[in-house]
Image: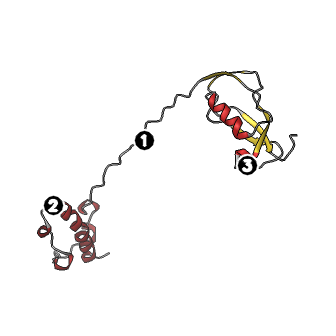
């Protein structure tokens, strides 16, 4: 990029900034009437990144709530979920304070895209077992499609 195009780019970038500073419509000349005079040519090494003005960027505004790392602790007796629809089993766990559970295909490696289409055949936490502490992601259901038999 030559010196004239660099200077023209800087002027074009500065015009919106000048307009934003106020002063009415008369304070800023339109791009068609701007005259740029170039100083005498200087060696390319003289131009540095610090000599190029950079427009300030607005600070990022965060509206989200801070994330707490403390996991919720639970204290309940694990219900028997075998034979129930996977979505219903997940809903029941949520009422007990566990909002993330896992499930896997008991007959292969299919993904459970629609949880209402799968039923629970087994669970890694036995029914009647006392569950305490952080159980998020610790409860796993073995599932098959509603039309299939459990293995």
| Place of residue 73 in the rendered image (x, y in percent of width and height, measured from the top left) | 59, 24
Name the foreground residue: 42 vs 95: 95
Marks 3/1: CA distance?
32 Å
Q: In the displayed structure, does residue 151 sit left or right of residue 101? A: right
Earlier sequence position, callout 1 versus callout 2: 2
Q: Which mark is residue 64?
A: 1
Q: Which mark is residue 22?
A: 2
Residue at the spot of label 3: 111
Residue at the spot 81% in from the left edge and 42% down from the top edge: 106
| Place of residue 144 in the rendered image (x, y in percent of width and height, measured from the top left) | 80, 44
Q: Residues within 10 Å of mark 1 (few under 14, many from 20)?
A: few
Marks 3/2: CA distance?
59 Å
Earlier sequence position, callout 3 versus callout 1: 1
Name the foreground residue: 50 vs 14: 14
| Place of residue 34 in the rendered image (x, y in percent of width and height, measured from the top left) | 17, 76
Earlier sequence position, callout 3 versus callout 2: 2
Q: Quadrant of residue 90?
A: top right
Q: Is residue 30 above or below residue 116?
A: below
Q: Quadrant of residue 22?
A: bottom left
Q: Residues within 10 Å of mark 2 (few under 14, many from 20)?
A: few
Residue at the spot 63% in from the left edge and 36% down from the top edge: 100
């Amino acid at each position: 990029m030559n010196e004239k195009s660099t200077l023209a780019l800087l002027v074009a970038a500065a015009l919106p900034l000048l307009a934003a500073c106020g002063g009415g419509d008369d304070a800023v000349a339109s791009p068609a009437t701007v005259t740029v005079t170039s100083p005498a040519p200087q060696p390319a090494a003289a131009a540095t990144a610090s000599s190029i003005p950079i427009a300030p960027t607005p600070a990022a505004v965060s509206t989200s709530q801070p994330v707490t790392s403390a996991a919720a602790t639970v204290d309940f007796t694990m219900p028997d979920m075998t034979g129930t629809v996977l979505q219903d089993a997940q809903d029941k766990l949520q009422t007990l304070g566990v909002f993330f559970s896992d499930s896997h295909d008991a007959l292969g490696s299919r993904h459970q895209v629609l949880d209402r289409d799968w039923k629970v055949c087994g669970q890694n936490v036995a029914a009647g077992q006392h569950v305490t502490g952080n159980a998020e992601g610790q409860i796993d259901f073995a599932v098959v499609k509603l039309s299939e038999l459990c293995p």
